[in-house]
Amino acid sequence: MLGDIPELLHVLGKYLNTRDLVACLQVSTLWNKVFTEHLWRTIDDSQRPWRRLLSYFSEPIATFYYPEQFTARSLEPVPEPLLELFVKYGHHIRNLVIRRPHTIEVCVLAEARARAMAQQMEEVGTNSEGIGGAGTETRTGSGSASSPVKNIPCCGLVKLRFDFTLSTLGLIDDLDGNRSLSSPALSTLSATIIENQEKELLPAIEDVPVDIFRPKSGTWSSPRPSHAVTLARSSWKLIRNNPKLQVLYMRSLSSLTMPKLIPTARDFVLATIAGLPRLRSLQANFHQQEDFLAMVPTILPQLEMLCYMDPSKEGFDRLLIADPESRFESNCSLDADGIHNYHKDTLSPLRSLQVTADIHSGHLRAILSTFPRLKRLSMENLLQNDSKGSPIYVHTALHTVLERLSVKRWDDLAITDILFPAVKDFTLIRVAGIRNLLKILHLFPGLERFRLCERRRQPEEAPVDFRTERPLPITAVILYGDGFHEEILVNGFLSLMPHLVSVQLDKAYPSTVRLLAQQCPSLESLEFLMTASEVVSDTSKELGALFSSCERLRCCMGPGLVVDANEVATQGNNWICRRLQRLSFGVVGIPRLTKQQQAILDHMLQRLGITLSTLGTDVENFLEGSCTEEESFIWRQYQECKRLQQAVYQRLGQFTELYELDLGLPLQLASDNEGVEDRYERLVSESLELTLASGLGHMSRLGKLRILGICRVDQRLLGTEIKWMKGHWPCLKVVRCLNLDGVLCNIGLDEWMLRMIPQS
């Protein structure tokens, strides 16, 4: 049988989640043996079943609130059954995410106990004739005695992530601080933890010195062992036990709020990191290790991604002192066009770098020279260059291969010796003035995607004449924040981008929609992120022009897009964007009958003994002489209401690719009536009915529809319409509407039926 082939089961185990793997363990002995390896391959101590398994030593956060109930449980040492499980199966672990400090403790203890057991077995085998330890391999780990490598737990990790919560670090800080001296519960907790750790944990981490975590000045405030230092020593011990690591996330061990977690010994840090030759991704802050960044190409030759979180700029000054220009020039040559050709075998393979320090253009050039293969760079603030600081290189222009660049604030507008011909994605959080923004963007001749989060309001020396500016090659733009709330600036800036395909803005100015309709026939996505107080009331003609000129349009979304039903009825025949997948606009201008008018119409039909379904086409002649002038007016209004709704449904029904349709209306257009008890008083009376009698059946071809928005729509849906929706829109799962408290929410179709129309 196929289920008895281990190779096939191993392939299957790669695609199963934790819950399915636990179920597979109970099938048979063979399946238990095969899928145990896959179950233990990835451990996240905050996810089941590991969260439940490791609950024996969850952080004693609750001690502050229920000391009598939780203190005893929180002070228990590592349970022996759990430790035995890690000793037995821990060698299968490849990916480990640690959010609880005690997870580190059990990993370190399991490794130490397994090595002690292996050493005992080796000694027994050496003293026994005929055994002699044949067939065993030896390994000398970093700081560990030689022992058999087979089945040593927690020593084959490929990915390791330390992700402690702030509450956990806060508790450890309280245990080390003066608060534990004034709190009996904390004092007892601290003493018991230290007593438990002294039995087995502290001897297991003795090769990680205590002194390297002490600050350069000052002494400990308490003679007791520091809980933070013990946590840091255990963490670094776990790192040193895994020389095959490829991904290491150490942000929690680099917390600037707890400097005790950061080792101060340069040789220890460099030796530990250099002992990870396969490391490809690293996120850490080696505080007071100024030369680490300059030594990355030497100690980590395979590193491809680095997040360097040291906020000081000394490390970048060391890059300048190390003269990366000479190293760069020795590893490349110039072709006939003056472009650098790299000797790929001698350069650092780093492709992604994130730094959190404020740097200047000299630092930037040093970074790009040290890591010439860099494809993605994210940094804080690019300041103006200070000639009084570190040396500035003024050699030939440096051609970079950067493709993605993210900068929080760009102040240096005089960069001329660094060229960015390959940058296609640029994110800028803050810039002062539109003129400065244009200067920056012209540094990127091949830019395709641009995102600006905030443009600081700054008086310009003179109005910017966008007609004289060079066009930009940008095809996708995102603009939001206080800097782009001026219609003239938004339109002028977008006029420089004739090749736009995707646009995301804060506000939907009618003139902006008109500009995009005229200038960007290849537009595929248009989204607005406005709030209710910034809504534009009517964009009917502009949206009609957009739908009539942009054939490739896939998405048109925005909470404030409002159209008039008459415009839809007259312009809808010209719409060519038949591939729309996401559409959002509220329809108004429908002459709906009031409750009083509806009562008059019903009374008239009852008096005449007819129904709306039995009326023929010659309605006017039938009703002539049979009703009053008021009844005739109400009847014509009803006919016009029905005609407009049918026209709207027909236009929407042609978008057969739609999977999200939001007909909701913005909050600003709601009625100001004070009677909030009646939910209909919060609705817009001139909106769609969404009934089969009004023509909803024209939208029967929207079989792919999954999300329907009806916020503030005065709908009259009943059980007949719901049954029709389920039959013709089988994919519909979510309804976006207002709940009974007036809050916009997404709810399931069945829940919405029970909540809003229980009679269906």
Image (cartoon, grey):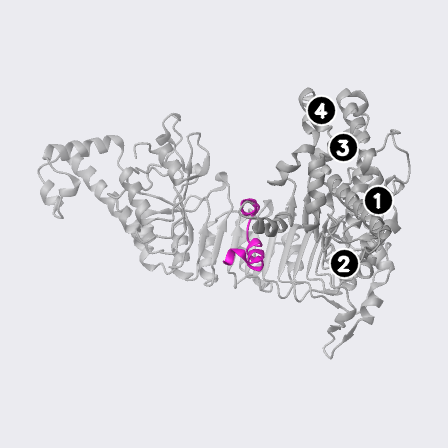
Crowd class of label 2 (few under 14; some 14 to 19; many from 20; radius 10 Å): some
Q: Tell me, yes or no, if residue 144 can be seen here.
A: no
Quadrant of the rendering where the C terminus is positioned: top left
Give yes or no for contact between labels 2 and 3 (Cβ–Cβ under 8 Å): no
User: What type is the residue that disc 2 sits on?
Assistant: Leu
Position of 477 with respect to 394 (left or right) is: left
User: Which residue bears the numbered disc 4?
Assistant: 72
Q: Quadrant of residue 174?
A: top right
Give yes or no for contact between labels 1 and 3 (Cβ–Cβ under 8 Å): no
Crowd class of label 4 (few under 14; some 14 to 19; many from 20; radius 10 Å): few
- Residue 713: where, in percent of width, then height? 36, 39
User: Which residue bears the numbered disc 1?
Assistant: 263
User: Callout 3: helix, strand or loop?
Assistant: helix
Q: Quadrant of residue 614?
A: top left
- Residue 351: where, in percent of width, then height? 70, 61
Who is closer to the viewer here, 610 or 150? Answer: 150
Marking on residue 583: none
Crowd class of label 1 (few under 14; some 14 to 19; many from 20; radius 10 Å): many
User: Callout 1: helix, strand or loop?
Assistant: loop
- Residue 26: where, in percent of width, then height? 55, 44
Give me the residue at 72% from left, 44% from top. Answer: 87
In the figure, 532 relative to 67: above or below? Answer: below
Give the magenta part as a residue range: 1-25
Q: Tell me, yes or no, if residue 418 can be seen here.
A: yes
User: Which residue bears the numbered disc 3?
Assistant: 172
Give me the residue at 69% from left, 66% from top. Answer: 401
